[in-house]
Amino acid sequence: MNDETVTSKIIGWIEENQEQLIQLTQDLVRIPSISGEEYEVQKRVHKELEVMGLLPEFYNPDEKELRKHKDFFETTSFAKYGYDDRPNVAGLLKGTGGGRSLCLSGHVDVVSPEPLEKWSRDPWSADVVDGNIHGRGAGDMKAGVAAMIFAVKALQENGIKLKGDVQIETTIEEEDGGVGGVLYMRTIRPKTNAALVPEPSNYTISLASAGVMYFRVTVPGLPAHAATAHFGVNAIQKMMLVINEIENLHKDRQSRISYPTAESDPRMKGRATTINIGVIRAGDWPSTVPGSCKIECRIGFPPGETREQVMAQVEVAVKNAADGDDWLSKNRPEVTWFGWKARPHEIEESNPFVQQVRNSVNQVVGIDPMFIGGSSGLDTRFFVHHGVPAVTCGPKAERIHSFDEIVTIDSTVKTAQVIASTMMEWCGVK
């Protein structure tokens, strides 16, 4: 039996046994696992890998070791939950020797389903309707996790022996920055020759991730009774000056910063960098002039800039707002950086592993996949920063991070087939 025949056999087996893949995806979706609360779903994954004979282990993040790493930052889920009872899980499909190794990595944490009243069905239902699996995390990214596990099972069920090792990892807190997840695993797990992360992508291949940072600006005011507001200084009104400068910086950056793979992503519509003002807090009573105002923002930037350069631009913008106002020039706004502090990453299209995934998508799906990347923070950055070529490529999902999230069954099946093909071609078949 030649290599092409073996691949066709595995692709056919996955198609014929897809009900098992659907069931596994549903099992994972039905276990709520908002960032910080991943333990129960990790137990389910551990059980699955144990039945498959992959000798899975739990790996709780070591905060002290993580703090030594230059990419460490305190995530919001860490601040709330710490790292106790929040394990990563890893198993191993041992190769016979002489082949290249591969890591299949996926996160099991999801974002909150709120507001619940917007959903047309229970967000943890995992209902199958019209060829789609519904539920929070169905697309991002429990279908991808199920697909990578099922791809390994397909090889086992058909007696296929790989030459290279395959590590299977399910990790925590990707939605919150991935520090206790993929970053920690890269500090303790063996280095592989490549990594594949089946994030939802509709078969596009992501070659890069954005740098992502959060910052907070605090503007002081002077409280007063609303009847004598002219004796006070309204912090909200002063914050508007800061917001205007931040918006000017946002527009300036979008006019001069270009990154082709981010701009080719139809979701970005040609924009490679963004500044989002996501939170504003001020005042506590309509009859009081607010004495303080805070905003919290997210800035994303493609490869080509450093964290330090971007931080300096934001701080100059806030300084310019203060310098142009009598009150703020004497009562300076404060800029603090918190949460996400991710470096961008990129990998060349010509990399052999990139081309292998491209060929697998072409073989299974029958398309030449688009290359995207550089617009959002991804766990793949931790692999690349540790010298491991890595890409994301996964199923078709809609409304991730929104209500009525879905993933298509057809694309989940094809993702498992792409992963199986990639494993056999990359690691080698005995």
Image (cartoon, grey):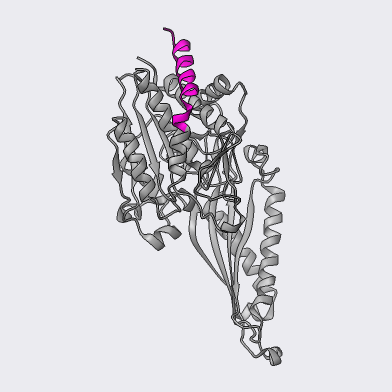
Q: In this image, 416 relative to 375: left or right?
A: left
At 65% from the left edge and 91% from the top edge, which residue is drawn?
Answer: 225
Comparing 35 with 185, the one in front is 35
Q: Where is residue 395? Give x, y as percent.
A: 55, 34
* Residue 226 in sight here: yes
Comparing 283 with 206, the one in front is 283
Quadrant housing the C terminus: top left
Q: Is residue 354 above or below residue 161?
A: below
Q: Is residue 159 magenta?
A: no
Q: Quadrant of residue 426?
A: top left
Which residues make up the magenta segment? Answer: 1-21
At 58% from the left edge and 61% from the top edge, which residue is drawn?
Answer: 297
Q: Is residue 153 above or below residue 346?
A: above
At 54% from the left edge and 26% from the top edge, which residue is drawn?
Answer: 350
Q: Is residue 10 magenta?
A: yes
Q: Main secondary structure of the magenta part?
A: helix
Q: Where is residue 39? Give x, y as percent.
A: 36, 50
Query: Which residue is at the far top?
Result: 1
Q: Where is residue 30? Give x, y as percent.
A: 45, 46
Comparing 32 with 163, the one in front is 32
Q: Is residue 251 above or below residue 303?
A: below
Label count reads: 0
Q: In this image, 163 relative to 403: left or right?
A: left
